[in-house]
Amino acid sequence: MPTRWKFALLYFSEGAPIGFLWWGLPTLLRQDDVAVERIAALTATLALPWTLKFLWAPLVDACRSSRWGFKHWAGAAQLGMGACLLPLIWIDPATHFGVWFGLLLTHAVCAATQDVAIDALAINAVESTERGSLNAAMQIGMLGGRSLFGGGAIVLVGWGGWPVLFGALLTAIWLSLLVLWRGVEEPPKAEGESRRFWTTLRAGFSRRTTWLGLGFALIAGAGFETVGALAGPLLVDHAASSGTVATFFAFPVVIAMAIGGWVGGRWSDRGPRPVRAGIALVALTLAVLLVALAAKSGASVPLLITTLVVVYLTIGAFTAISYALFMDLTDPALGATQFSTFMAATNGCEVWAVAAGGLLVGRLGYGPGFSLMALAGLLGLAVLWALTRKARTA
């Protein structure tokens, strides 16, 4: 099996808990009569480990030896993820919500740590010329996990209750251990790498390219993050039924992002990554502007869905290309720390863009609000231009 598909299977085990915690769990808890306020507090808290994982990512790089590597970090995290889920099979969430909260938060910390270790493993295990294809395959795996254990979680609980759901989730997580141990080799560790870690860390974050990458991560996604957060409300406000909205997110969104990621990722391996990222950003901006135009003109629901599918196609391509770019900018010796920081910056982009986009849409409407946020994202082209110049003069 090609290496990229092994990592796709590992990313499936990353996407599964995210889909469960962020998509499926809130619905299931509400069906068990858990108060909305408690569900909202739980969901918001469970998102924090993925935002803050860069704070403990240096441990994954620094505490690495010939006997304990990235695979050990990922494997230990996966065992911890499963261990936190096992007791939930027998514990009722409505009467023991505090226990659920603690176990799920620990599960989320383990899952975020798994992400850190697998990303570091991928950066060190795959040549730079294959990172676009790698990220394309990993996005497909991640989306599959999110879809199956997001909407699928609701179906599984309907069939057999919480034991069936947690049994399936445990199987997905722990089966990936076989792929991890038998399918992926631990990259060699340079002599004295641990002793030089803090020196390497200071050098990595003193490079201009690191800060340019962080700037790109914080800016470029402004348009699509806004559309992604408000696509559901947009369709509802244009009289789409709840069934239509649910079907849209369950199938067209996932399929479009998977196709876009596969095509865009492989395409980015065939030329300068910053240039390809710039082209993808322009395409993404045009797609968001198309949705803005459709919303402004009062388009029908089918036409809105068509334009949104185009946006999600370009989101898939842009995500695969930009993640490959972040891998290119990451020092392999800082595979966990530096890449996790880039990912934290993309989360930061989501926070400010959704907040700003929501205010603009509330005051100006969907068309102008989406348009302004898309144009704000185009500022990322200046960062890419600076990266291109830096590469030419290096």
Image (cartoon, grey):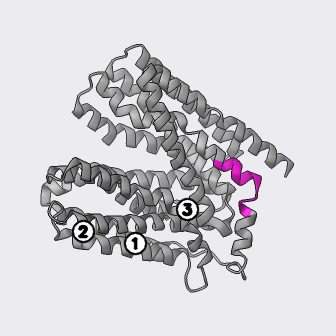
Residue nearer the viewer, 103 or 155: 103
Say what amino acid the circle numbered 3 marks: Phe
Most prominent secondary structure in the magenta stretch? helix
In the depicted structure, whether residue 288 falls above or below residue 97: above
Q: Position of residue 240 (x, y in %)?
A: 27, 26
Q: Which residue is mark 1?
A: 78
Magenta-colored span:
204-214
Residue nearer the viewer, 308 or 32: 32
Residue 203, can we see it?
yes
In the depicted structure, whether residue 68 falls above or below residue 31: below
Secondary element type, mark 3: helix
Q: Residues within 10 Å of mark 2 (few under 14, many from 20)?
A: some
Label ID, residue 54: 3
Secondary element type, mark 1: helix
Mark found first going from the N terminus, 2 or 3: 3
Where residue 340 sits, quadrant-wise, is bottom right
Residue 225, can we see it?
no
Residue nearer the viewer, 47 or 282: 47
In the depicted structure, whether residue 281 falls above or below residue 156: above
Q: Residue at x 47, y 67 (%)?
A: 113
Q: Which residue is mark 2?
A: 99
Mark found first going from the N terminus, 3 or 1: 3
Of labels 1 and 2, the one closer to you:
2
Q: Residues within 10 Å of mark 3 (few under 14, many from 20)?
A: many
Q: Position of residue 318 (x, y in %)?
A: 56, 41
